[in-house]
């Protein structure tokens, strides 16, 4: 009787489950897509965050683990995405190689707490800069300006932008209670809006023809376009501005300024556009310019 | 309190939407459930089997699963329609199983002698059910049927997750995550909205119960 093998399988599954629930802990996940330059023998003023991190030869970076094209963990455990690459660029400027970075999962709702409790040194996680969040953390960047956009079936040529929605009577899908769902109400009649609890349901409704348009931030839509094997595309330009910043401890002006300088350097040297092209650029047509930095405060 | 008063229009629209869903779903599920109950007590074995299978499937599947099949399964089969009607269809299918059992218990509560007497004076199965058994069954069916309908009104909150916008429970998501208002007062408003529907529904059922009650 194969009781032993049943038992063994059970133990293996329990171990797997334990491993799967061990998120939120710093993990060493080497193996990235690109290799941004790593500074050699850098010196920083003693007492600064940079000096501490460069001395420790390690950095804890919070990012998304489930955001396609920006920060997504593969089954083998390695992280890929534009946010991840930006994190590697900043670490490289501190003289820290990618394999010494400790990645910490930073879901949207936990980002401020991770920074405030000192569990991460910085957060790069599709983190929109806004005034509410500025009360709690400081932002370097922005390093990218996302915006709300529209996703349609590839053969749809009638929807050309948010202003075309009312005229074409397009049925629009978004997520209940999200900012994009509230924004789009300005462009459509209430009867045109369908809301679900998650975007994947909207994508399914688009596939079966129950709705004509899915709307939210372009980066989330790009992830669905990438997974659709050419069935979906983006329509028109973005019509809101969501500047993505790098969150650091509130008031750490020196670190914030250092990150902004690093981003400017990366834009000059081309590693910024390389980071884009090897990740989100595989789906997005245009490579963005580095936006002008906000002042650190 | 201010949060509720400031958004009273949104609550009112949600209340009306939920009322509309529940009205259609109540009519549909009572008609369908009674029909299935007749199947289950009929003398024709295939009909009885169908009735039993119906109740087994829809009473034992979570409502969320039924709604999933309506909202995402039907379009997959090429049936496209509004999510409002998919949601109502799901509620009707699910609730009909419970209505069926409530009605069947009422039919079983009518003494067998009544049906036998009806058949003895020469009424057909349909006639005896329609004119003798069901009118008596209604009396004992009202209280359990009332519970089923009130449960359905509360279940209607789930259709909000399946593309039906604007029903009462979805008001919560619009006010809290989109506008950043406090969750508890917003939810108290939602609860009050449901009570506005369910309490009068319960009172109405009590009235119907007293009206149809006959001392035996």
Image (spheres, coloured by chain):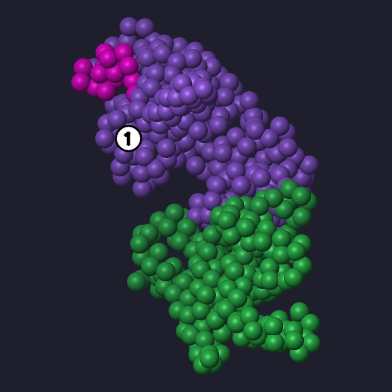
Does the image show residue A61?
no
Vertical order, B48 against A139 (above or below) = below
Seen at 75% across and 40% down, the residue is A154
Taking the magenta stretch, the answer to whether it contains residue A289 is: no
Q: Residues within 10 Å of mark 1 (few under 14, many from 20)?
A: many
Is A23 on the left or on the right of A32, as rendered?
left
Taking depth in this image into account, of A283 and A8 the one nearest to the observer is: A8
Residue numbers of the magenta segment: A46-60
Q: Colour of chain A?
A: purple
Most distant residue in the top direction: A41
Q: Which residue is at a point 36% across and 65% down the rendered structure image?
A: B185
Q: How many marks?
A: 1
Q: Is residue A49 magenta?
A: yes
The residue carrying mark 1 is A114
In this view of the protein, can residue A266 be seen by the observer?
yes
Where is residue B35, by image quadrant?
Answer: bottom right
């Amino acid at each position: 009787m194969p009781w032993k093998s049943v038992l063994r399988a059970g133990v293996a599954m329990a171990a797997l489950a334990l491993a799967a629930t061990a998120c939120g802990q710093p993990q060493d996940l080497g193996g990235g897509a690109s290799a941004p330059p790593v500074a050699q023998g850098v010196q920083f003023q003693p007492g600064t965050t940079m000096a501490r991190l460069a001395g420790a030869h390690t950095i804890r970076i919070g990012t998304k683990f489930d955001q396609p094209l920006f920060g997504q963990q593969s089954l083998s455990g390695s992280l890929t995405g534009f946010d991840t690459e930006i994190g590697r660029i900043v670490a490289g400027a501190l003289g820290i190689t990618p394999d010494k970075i400790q990645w910490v999962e930073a879901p949207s709702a936990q980002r401020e707490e991770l920074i405030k409790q000192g569990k991460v040194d910085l957060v790069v996680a599709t983190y929109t800069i806004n005034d509410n969040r500025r009360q709690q953390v400081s932002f370097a960047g922005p390093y990218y300006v996302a915006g709300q956009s529209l996703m349609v079936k590839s053969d749809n040529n009638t929807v050309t932008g948010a202003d075309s929605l009312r005229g074409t009577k397009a049925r629009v899908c978004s997520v209940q209670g999200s900012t994009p769902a509230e924004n789009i109400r300005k462009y459509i009649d209430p009867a045109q809006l369908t809301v679900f609890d998650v975007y994947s349901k909207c994508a399914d409704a688009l596939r079966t023809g129950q709705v004509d348009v899915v709307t939210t931030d372009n980066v989330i839509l790009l992830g669905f376009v990438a997974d659709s094997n050419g069935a979906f595309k983006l329509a028109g330009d973005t019509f809101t501005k969501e500047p993505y910043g790098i969150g650091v401890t509130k008031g750490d002006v020196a670190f914030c300024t250092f990150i902004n300088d690093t981003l400017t350097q990366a834009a000059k040297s081309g590693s910024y556009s390389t980071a884009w092209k090897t990740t989100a650029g595989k789906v997005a047509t245009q490579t963005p310019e580095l936006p002008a930095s906000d002042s650190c405060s | 309190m201010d949060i509720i008063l400031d958004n009273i229009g949104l609550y009112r629209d949600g209340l009306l939407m939920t009322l509309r869903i529940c009205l259609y779903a109540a009519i549909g599920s009572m008609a369908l459930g009674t029909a299935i109950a007749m199947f289950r007590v009929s003398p024709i074995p295939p009909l009885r089997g169908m009735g039993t299978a119906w109740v087994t499937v829809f009473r034992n599947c979570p409502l969320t699963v039924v709604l999933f099949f309506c909202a995402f399964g039907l379009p997959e089969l090429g049936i496209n329609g509004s999510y409002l009607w998919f949601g109502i269809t799901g509620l009707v299918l699910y609730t009909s199983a419970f209505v069926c059992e409530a009605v069947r218990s009422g039919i079983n509560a009518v003494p067998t002698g009544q049906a036998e007497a009806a058949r003895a004076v020469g009424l057909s199965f349909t006639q005896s059910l329609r004119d003798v058994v069901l009118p008596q069954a209604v009396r004992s069916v009202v209280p359990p049927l009332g519970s089923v309908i009130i449960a359905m009104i509360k279940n209607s909150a789930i259709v909000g997750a399946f593309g039906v916008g604007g029903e009462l429970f979805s008001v919560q998501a619009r006010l809290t995550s989109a506008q950043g208002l406090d969750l508890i007062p917003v939810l108290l408003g939602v609860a009050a909205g449901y009570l506005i529907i369910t309490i009068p529904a319960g009172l109405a059922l009590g009235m119907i119960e007293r009206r149809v009650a006959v001392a035996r």
